[in-house]
Amino acid sequence: MPMTRRYFIRNSGIGVFGLGFVPTFLRQTAYALQQPDSRRRKKILVAIFQRGAADGLNIVVPFGEKDYYSLRPTINIPTPSSAVADKDHTLVDLNGFFGFHPSLSSLKPIFDAKRLAVIHAVGSPDNTRSHFDAQDYMESATPGIKSTDDGWLNRYLRSCPEAEASPFRAVAFAPRMPRTLMEPAPAIAIDDLHNIR
């Protein structure tokens, strides 16, 4: 099955964060390979950029804001409540104001352990009216400049080289290389984890 946004979100807790079906080499990469006690474990950045129409207000919901429910009467997600029998359709409370969409419930323990942060309501200072240009500017991190060939994550990889870097230092779960990882530092794109054994 090709990697899609719905597939990723549905399986993120099981697949990427739970690491239940992920091949060994990706599991080791995700856990930054167990380092000897004398060395600190490496930090891992997981950047999720959903090209298209991701509804941020229904991914991380500001349920404590009364206007959320009055302005979204038909598309809101029900508040977290112990009275609701069907937990698959109610929010996962994060802090009494924000909540995860129910399909992201597997991320709650990572959030509680302070190993996951949500940066809400961010955007570009460029006022382009083009959806496609706006996506490119976000991935290149050069708002308003169309000539940028590389992505911001690739520039980071080049600015922090590692002598013995794994070939899987930068992995994209996508059918093709996303702009964030383009040029020239090595990176790979994987569209179907089941093809890797």
Image (tube, rainbow, N blue to C red):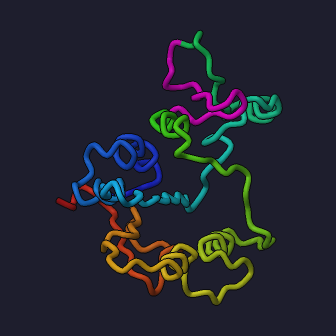
- Which x, y percent locates residue 190? 33, 66
Report the side of 119 relative to 101 (left or right). Answer: right
- Which x, y percent locates residue 122? 73, 57
Picture quadrant where residue 186 is located: bottom left
- At x 22%, y 55%, the residue is 24
Front-lying residue, 27 or 60 = 27
Report the side of 97 relative to 19 (left or right). Answer: right
Decide: is 149 above or below 79.
below
Residue at the far left in the pictured view: 197
Q: Is residue 103 visible?
A: no
Picture quadrant where residue 151 is located: bottom right
Front-lying residue, 157 or 101 = 157
Magenta range is 85-102
Residue at the far front in the pictured view: 38
Residue 93 highlighted magenta (yes or no) = yes
- At x 40%, y 77%, the residue is 162
- Which x, y percent locates residue 88? 49, 25
Decide: is 86 above or below 38.
above
Picture quadrant where residue 77 is located: top right
Report the side of 56 relative to 14 (left or right). Answer: right
Decide: is 84 above or below 186.
above
Q: The N terminus appears in which quarter of the rendering?
A: bottom left
- Total label count? 0
Q: Is residue 171 visible?
A: yes
Decide: is 99 above or below 163.
above
- At x 59%, y 9%, the residue is 83
Residue 46 highlighted magenta (yes or no) = no
Residue at the far bottom in the pictured view: 147
Q: The C terminus appears in which quarter of the rendering?
A: bottom left
